[in-house]
Amino acid sequence: RRRHRRADRHGGRGRGHHAVVPLIPRRIGLLFAVFLALLAIAALRATYLGAVQGGQLKNAAATQQAAEVEVPARRGAIVDRLGVELAVTEPAEDISVTPYLVKDPVRAAEKLAPLLAQSEGDLLKKLTRRDTGFVYLARAMPAKKSHSVQKLDIPGVAFTPSNRRIYPREWLASQVLGTVGTDGKGLSGLEFSKNELLRGSAGTRRIVRDALGDAISVRDPVRAEPGAKLSLTIDAAIQDKVEEVLQNVGAKYKPKGATALVMDPRNGELLAVANWPRVNANDVADMPDYAKQNRAIGFNYEPGSTFKAITVAGALEDGKVTPETAFNLPPQIVVADRTIGESHPRGYVTLKTKEILSQSSNVGSVMIGERLGKKRFDHWVRRFGFGKPTGADLPGEEGGQVLPLEKYSGSSMGNLPIGQGISVTPMQMASAYGAIANGGIMRPARIVKSINGTATRMPEGRRVMKPQTSRALRQMLEGVLDPAGTGSQAKIPGYQLAGKTGTAEKVDEETGLYSESKYIASFVGFAPANKPQLLVAVMVDEPNGAIYGGEVAAPAFQQITSFSLNYLRIPPE
């Protein structure tokens, strides 16, 4: 019986039901557990996005729908004194992209690269940005190039009207005008110094786009105000002629550089400011820095013999000499440890002050300087404006270098009176000779004639010397162009001209001594001599084949002055 009950206890359930849980409920439980885990992860992610990144995502979404961009003002034009356009603004387009709308960034970068002149790698970075819904691909793209990009029909790429600065005369006065960056700001020249006047006031444009990136709303909450129009004192015809002459000088003598300017000494108006090598203002990227420099105001050099007129002017004004004062000149003169001779060896000779100037005697000029004395010499150097900028309305003007009186050595008065040991700019020399031409009154050079049609104020002049001293100097400088003078190649039939040649040795940067192969050739003069209306200064840096101012610079002066006299209808005397 006992065995029977045990058999009933074990056998009553049967072998097939021994401790088995059904399969389907187990699978349902497993799936339910996975679902709960995923739900927990999603909840945590939502919490993180909302609490931590909510602001960033909200901003990104907003920029994918609406963008507020700056609308640049139309930059003011720059024209010459007769209205010839020198710098103008033409319509262009800014090209931008909404990155998340670009379906194939790699392919898009390949297509855009040659048209935008950018590398595929740089473009790909812009096309795949995810922190913003608006990225510039190009600024101020010319309409023709922009249309080529539009033809690609790349999703997400948009086009916004913009402005582009161009220079219709390309090379003309390019170093004076300067350039503008893609952001519309002036980088150099007048574009830089007059940027506040030219740039105008930018506006604001709000663009709302749909999910496909198409603009559905464009409005300008703040309208752009155009910049001012600048009319310069420059005359495009004279400027063009001056640049042509310098181009010929460059071809003939292959110098390091050359500069020339034309000024009306009566009011300081600059009719031309030219530099060689020339630069195309529409394409300056590959030009060397020295070519882009406006040497008329930014190049310091030792003036050499053109400075002798300043030495003589001081001596005349102080009553130390007259035009007829005679000097017995030895072949050489010794000042302290320095021996000064003439450019062409000669014997003993007697020359008057006016002949010392016309024949450009080094020995005679040093003797005049000694009569003047170092203290009064220093006074007249500074009186004529050397050692500081002239105040010409051009950016980047240098002031030259003038030795302080307390640093004069025993030999200083052996080189300073002949234009050595002092550095000047072409503009400074022009201004100094302008005082001689203008009855002793020096006027700062000016280049902006009017702003939006309103004439700019002519700067007040400063008296440098008495009218009679100015008159005497003009007559003495006429002799430079006589057959016996150093500037005979500057003569123009029918006109009385006055001027001075200059041939200056350059200092060798390695040795610190004067070079025997590198020179500055120059000529500064004015016409007509009795009532000057034109002043022309020419400076040629390191000419080859010839070195003298009378041979290199004087003919250039003659060509520029002859053209200008005829063009301005200034009659012969």
Image: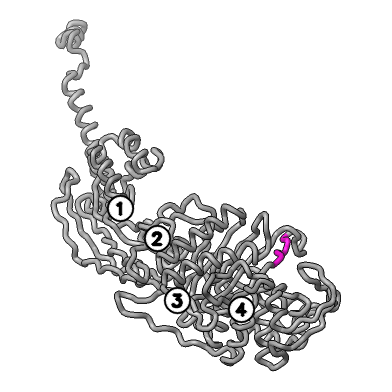
Query: What residue is disc 3 on?
Result: 571
The amino acid type, in three-letter code, at marker 1 is Val
Q: Position of residue 400 (x, y in %)?
A: 62, 73
Query: What residue is disc 4 on?
Result: 478
Task: Mark 2 or mark 1: name the one nearer the start of the chain.
Answer: 1
> Height in image: 223 above or below 163?
below
Asked which secondary structure carries label 3, the reply is loop
State left or right for residue 355 relative to residue 14. Answer: right
Q: Nearer the viewer, residue 243 or 96?
A: 243
Task: Mark 2 or mark 4: name the one nearer the start of the chain.
Answer: 2
Task: Mark 3 or mark 1: name the one nearer the start of the chain.
Answer: 1
Residue at 45%, 76% (x, y): give it: 571
Task: Mark 3 or mark 2: name the one nearer the start of the chain.
Answer: 2
**Few, some or many residues within 10 Å of mark 2 (<14, 14–19, 20+):** many
Instruction: Report the disc number at residue 180.
Output: 2
Q: Position of residue 448 (x, y in %)?
A: 40, 74
Distance between the alpha carbons at the discs numbered 4 and 3: 18 Å
Distance between the alpha carbons at the discs numbered 2 and 1: 43 Å
Query: What residue is disc 1 on?
Result: 52
Q: Nearer the viewer, mark 3 or mark 2?
A: 3
The N terminus appears in which quarter of the rendering? top left
Distance between the alpha carbons at the discs numbered 3 and 2: 41 Å
Q: Nearer the viewer, mark 2 or mark 1?
A: 2
State left or right for residue 449 relative to residue 244. Answer: left
